[in-house]
Image (spheres, rainbow, N blue to C red):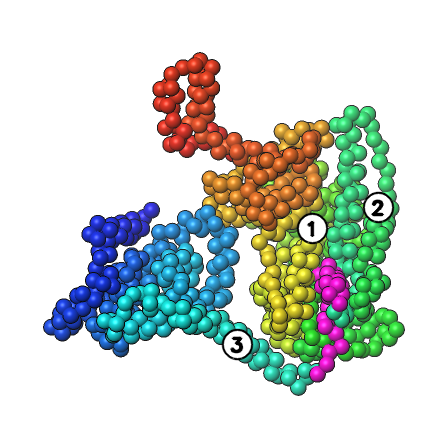
């Protein structure tokens, strides 16, 4: 704690101690005030400025120290200074004192609370940044909420001091007027309870609702202003309740929900039902990963006691299997299935022509080439994303594949360059290397999987190098060229150029949301800094009846988050005027399906450190797990972040066999606020990989036992064996209480 904090803490403690020791509370009693009223009025008449100044300073100190008595002091202001001057003095003194208490609370306690409850506080700060002024104003209008408590609690948040001051002054003005006015008739006031009558409190409660109602009115006025240019286009009747643009993961879920609640819904898709996930993303990549893994495991036959395992395959046959897998899953996302559910499925290109109209240029069905205009109460944009190809000189000349186009390959590339070290690049680089390509992976950043912790990245990179992948981290692609009939990439590393010859280039440097071509520009719907469609916490764009979900909305571009946001978009679009729900991104898991797999939920060490959130880390090595040893997969870790001196889980990372499945237990625990020790108390089947989660919890528990506690237990059991004296046992008790040193680091 710095000197300023010490000074504030000591000053506050001194003021409170003086209040108690000197029994100052008796001077803030209504009966004492009434008995001294004439004397105080005489003192004020003889020296008005000194009395007013002393009163102002006393009120500020009283409020800043959060000492009870503000109500009595406010009555005194009315009795001494009258309604106008009394209100003026109390209004400024109370606001200044409240702000000082607010600042003191922030300086003394915010860092401590942030370190322990960082994620919850971040969510509160985000809400206050949006609606904080309205919320504080409502609290200030209702005297049922202790004002000193509001001062201290708001100090823990990120609210701006100036905002706190002016909102407090404005919000407390009504209550100040009531109490100062009562003070002008002090002789008639019998008790403070009489002032705070049910009728008065009810009136204040209605006032408290006013700013929230005003906020809704402001929203309605803003919406009216946005819709005004289109008012002449608003139809009297609507053909549909919902039109969904895009039939990928997000669009399918939105349409499914609308059909489930018996709404009229139209789903428009210009390419293939199922979107990228089914046709070019999750499904084909996992099918390819499976085939490549079987080949890799066969090469490890001797590790499993097999003399030899010969594997012969055709790359074309593997790609045929990928297509068969897509075809097997395709009926789940087909137009026929959704039509049977009650969804109208239209093949075509959709364009939003007004907030309530979507024009579809038909590309299939009965009228290809024709157009159809649909009126609808709400629109959901689920346009997805596409692979990003950076504008590197020469890239068009050599040509490149992406995760969307590589599935047309029929021949295995002899020399493959993978540009990008993120999840997609890593998964595909390992696949092609296992199938026999000579793979060079070029990544500009200093390590692969940059969103994960360095030790996790190092684990994956070591496996890649062992499998023959030329991992070129810290290499920035400069240009491509065709030289003497060969394709070449030049990359910069430590100021020097490296020349790499290749046959096929696979670009996997990320994905960008589809935000063009369907009417956003004409309606003025914005794009955020992540290049996604701008939306609020309810997935609404600037037009409340036009919503967005999935990759087009961000911030996470996963199939499971697409489905998650689609639920909010559909519900808020269908029931917005009556019910709405904020999208919840508090517990988002993801996995990279390399070998070893990497799965994560919540914070990792890197993010927690960057955000200044205190944590303790527990690591359990899979080399110690019986099932992993038996399977020959004793490589990897379970790493859990918890709040210091607590078992509350901040995040978990698993690197190893079936990490994507194992992480589910931590997702459930975090979503339901179950501590890590709940996993320790749960029976896990032996021998399974799932035991790794329980063992990590056990490692955390062992790390919490101090040296003193261990020594005391040793003495306790020795005493029980020897039937020794009670004194011998008692002298070790201080160690049990005071020794906080850990016996060994967690894990």
Estimate the spatial distance between the alpha carbons at disc 2 and disc 3, rounded to whole Å.
Answer: 60 Å
Q: Position of 566 compared to 294: left or right?
A: left
Q: Nearer the viewer, residue 651 or 343?
A: 343
Tag 1 residue: 424
Residues packed near mark 1 inside 10 Å, few (<14), some (14 to 19) or many (20 plus): many
Q: Which residues are magenta?
A: 236-262
Labels 2 and 3 touching (C-beta < 8 A):
no
The residue positioned 49% from the left and 58% from the top of the image is 124
Q: Quadrant of residue 480?
A: bottom right
Tag 3 residue: 217
Whether residue 266 is visible: yes
Work out whether mark 1 precedes mark 3 in sequence or the reverse, and give the earlier one.
3
The residue positioned 83% from the left and 61% from the top of the image is 337
Work out whether mark 1 precedes mark 2 in sequence or the reverse, and give the earlier one.
2
Tag 2 residue: 318
Whether residue 457 is visible: no
Which mark, by number, is residue 747? none
The quadrant of the picture occupied by the C terminus is top right
Residue 733 is covered by the magenta coloring: no
Q: Position of residue 548 (x, y in %)?
A: 66, 66
Q: Position of residue 484 (x, y in %)?
A: 76, 52
The residue positioned 27% from the left and 65% from the top of the image is 72
Q: Position of 4 compared to 519: left or right?
A: left
Q: Position of residue 595 (x, y in %)?
A: 70, 40
Residues packed near mark 3 inside 10 Å, few (<14), some (14 to 19) or many (20 plus): few
The residue positioned 51% from the left and 76% from the top of the image is 218
Q: Position of 82 compared to 323: left or right?
A: left
């Amino acid at each position: 704690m710095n000197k300023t904090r010490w000074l504030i803490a000591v000053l506050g403690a001194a003021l409170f101690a003086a209040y108690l020791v000197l029994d100052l509370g008796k001077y803030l009693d209504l009966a004492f005030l009434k008995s001294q009223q004439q004397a105080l009025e005489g003192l004020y008449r003889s020296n008005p400025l000194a009395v007013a100044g002393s009163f102002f300073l006393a009120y500020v100190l009283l409020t800043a120290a959060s000492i009870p008595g503000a109500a009595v002091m406010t009555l005194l202001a009315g009795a001494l200074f009258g309604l106008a001057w009394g209100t003026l003095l109390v209004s400024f003194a109370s606001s200044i004192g409240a702000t000082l208490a607010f600042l003191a609370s922030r300086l003394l306690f915010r860092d401590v609370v942030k370190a322990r409850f960082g994620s919850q506080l971040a969510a509160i700060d985000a809400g206050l940044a949006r609606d904080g002024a309205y919320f504080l104003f409502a609290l200030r209008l209702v005297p049922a909420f202790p004002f000193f408590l509001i001062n201290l609690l708001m100090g823990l948040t990120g609210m701006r001091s100036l905002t706190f001051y002016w909102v407090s002054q404005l919000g407390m003005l009504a209550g100040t007027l009531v109490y100062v006015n009562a003070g002008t008739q002090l002789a008639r006031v019998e008790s403070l309870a009489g002032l705070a009558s049910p009728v008065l409190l009810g009136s204040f409660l209605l006032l408290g609702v006013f700013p929230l109602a005003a906020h809704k009115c402001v929203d309605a006025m803003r919406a009216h202003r946005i819709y005004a240019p289109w008012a002449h286009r608003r139809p009297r009747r609507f053909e549909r309740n919902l039109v969904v643009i895009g039939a990928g993961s997000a669009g399918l879920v939105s349409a499914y929900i609308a059909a489930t609640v018996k709404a009229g819904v139209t789903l428009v898709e210009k390419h293939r039902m199922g979107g990228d996930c089914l046709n070019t993303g999750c499904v084909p990549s996992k099918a390819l990963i499976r085939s490549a893994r079987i080949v890799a495991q066969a090469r490890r036959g001797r590790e499993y006691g097999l003399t030899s395992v010969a594997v012969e395959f055709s790359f074309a046959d593997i790609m045929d299997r990928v297509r068969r897998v897509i075809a097997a899953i395709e009926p789940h996302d087909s137009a026929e299935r959704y039509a049977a559910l009650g969804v109208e499925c239209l093949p075509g290109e959709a364009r939003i022509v007004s907030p309530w109209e979507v024009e579809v240029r038909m590309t299939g069905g009965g009228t290809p080439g024709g157009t159809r205009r649909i009126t609808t109460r709400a629109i959901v944009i689920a346009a997805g994303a596409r692979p990003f190809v950076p504008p590197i000189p020469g890239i068009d000349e050599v040509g490149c594949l992406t995760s969307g186009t590589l599935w047309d390959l029929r021949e295995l590339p002899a020399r493959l360059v993978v540009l990008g070290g993120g999840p997609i690049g890593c998964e595909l680089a390992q696949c092609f290397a296992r199938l026999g390509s000579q793979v060079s992976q070029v990544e500009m950043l200093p390590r692969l999987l940059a969103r994960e912790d360095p030790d996790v990245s190092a684990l994956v990179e070591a496996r890649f190098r062992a499998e023959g992948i030329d991992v070129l981290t810290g290499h920035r692609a400069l240009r491509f060229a065709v030289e003497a009939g060969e394709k070449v990439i030049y990359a910069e590393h430590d100021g020097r150029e490296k020349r790499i010859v290749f046959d096929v280039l696979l670009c996997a440097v990320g994905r960008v949301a589809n935000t063009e071509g369907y009417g956003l520009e004409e309606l003025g719907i914005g794009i955020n800094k992540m290049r996604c469609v701008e939306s609020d916490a309810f997935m609404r764009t600037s037009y409340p009846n036009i919503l967005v979900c999935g990759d087009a909305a961000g911030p996470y571009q996963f199939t499971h988050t697409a489905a998650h946001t689609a639920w909010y978009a559909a519900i808020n679009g269908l029931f917005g005027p009556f019910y709405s729900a904020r999208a919840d991104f508090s517990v988002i898991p993801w996995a990279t399906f390399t070998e070893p797999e990497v799965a994560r939920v919540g914070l990792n060490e890197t993010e927690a450190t960057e955000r200044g959130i205190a944590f303790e880390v527990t690591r359990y090595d899979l080399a110690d797990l019986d099932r992993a040893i038996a399977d020959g997969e004793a490589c990897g870790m379970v790493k859990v972040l918890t709040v210091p001196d607590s078992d509350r889980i901040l995040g978990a990372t698993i690197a190893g066999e079936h990490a994507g499945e194992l992480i589910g237990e931590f997702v459930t625990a975090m979503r339901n606020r179950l501590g890590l020790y709940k996993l320790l108390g749960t029976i896990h089947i032996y021998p399974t990989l799932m035991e790794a989660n329980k063992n990590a919890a056990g490692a955390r528990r062992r790390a919490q036992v101090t040296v003193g506690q261990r020594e005391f237990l040793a003495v306790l059991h020795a005493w029980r064996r020897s039937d020794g004296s009670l004194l011998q046992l008692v002298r070790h008790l201080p160690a049990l209480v005071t020794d906080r040193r850990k016996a060994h680091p967690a894990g």
